[in-house]
Amino acid sequence: MLKKKLQYKITANPTPNNSHNVVDANSNERNLPLKVSPFFVPSYWELFYALECQLNGYLRLLKAPVELTHIYNPVEYAAQIHCDYLKRYLKGPMKVLFIGMNPGGDGMAQNGIPFGNISTVRDSMQLQGVIVDPPQQHPKRPIQGFECTREEPSGKRLWTLFQKLANNSLETFFQQCFVHNFCPLAFFDAQGRNITPSEIKGPYKKELQDTCLRAMEQQLHILQPDFIIAVGDYVFKALRNSEYCRGKRLLRLDHPSPRSLNNTNWPEKAETFLRENDLLKYLRNEVAAGHM
């Protein structure tokens, strides 16, 4: 019944004229947004991806402030790898959902994977594929995909810890846990400086948050997590307004970014947080999947 209800919601998807296509390794067009056929029940990852595409359409309708000169959406231009991530790791409801803020310039912006530092995506997840150029690139923020030599420090910290705690296996971690971002967009100003959603000024900031929260509400109903772990203050404050989260455990984990204050020993603090909240058993897939 859940899938059937969501199916009707995601078919009414805005398709602005400036939407563009992504080309995969076999040069077959991958049209965005994804359209769900009324003749079959889509898989979990297809339902989830359709909602992401719907969100992309709504975000394109918002008017960003002029100081945000370049806006990247890796869910679109890195669609092949992003979909492979969903297809491989999102096969059903998840007990624990970790939610980051938005793509980092050297992480998800390069490869379409949340917190996606290159070495983890390439070597541990073993994901590869075609990444096309976004419509407009800032010269100081080129999209190099797997040729990028810079590691996303937040992603390096996060995925290294999760892999270690899951007995050195991300396959184990993804049995009951998943990682996603609240907002799919990366923002840069004229100087190429990364502007996070929390740093945006004016009415666009609230419009962006409200639009992403509405999409997140639907995504949560697909994933059905009992534990929602907001990575950082921005996501935690936004999810306080989520109806779904009011009936579940919403927790805040410090953001792994080295830019965050008093965060030099983030791995140790994060492991303590996961242990104190009795979450390690889910990362290690030590308990049977189920919901409270």
Image (spheres, rainbow, N blue to C red):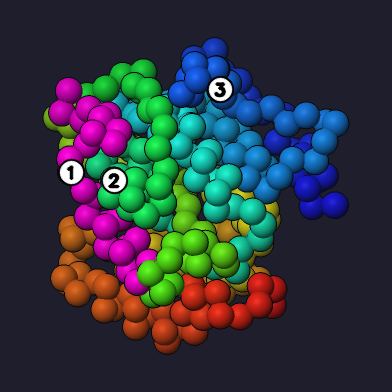
Regarding residue 64, the answer to whether it shows in the image is no
Q: Residues within 10 Å of mark 1 (few under 14, many from 20)?
A: few
Q: Does the magenta stretch include residue 143?
A: yes
Q: Which of marks 3 and 2 is nearer the N terminus?
A: 3
Q: In this view, does 273 lie above or below 224?
A: below
- Look at the numbered disc 2 and give the secondary structure of its residue: helix
Residue that numbered label 2 is attached to = 118
| Amino acid at dot 2 | Ile
Q: Does the magenta stretch include residue 31?
A: no
Residue that numbered label 3 is attached to = 30
Q: Residue 14 carries which label?
A: none
Give the magenta range: 139-164
**Left or right, 194 with reference to 229:** left
- Look at the numbered disc 3 and give the secondary structure of its residue: strand
Q: Which of 197 and 253 is in front in this view?
A: 253
Q: Are marks 1 and 2 in contact (CB under 8 Å)?
A: yes
The answer for how far apart the CA atoms under marks 1 and 3 are is 28 Å
Residue that numbered label 1 is attached to = 150
Q: Earlier in the sequence, mark 1 or mark 2?
A: 2
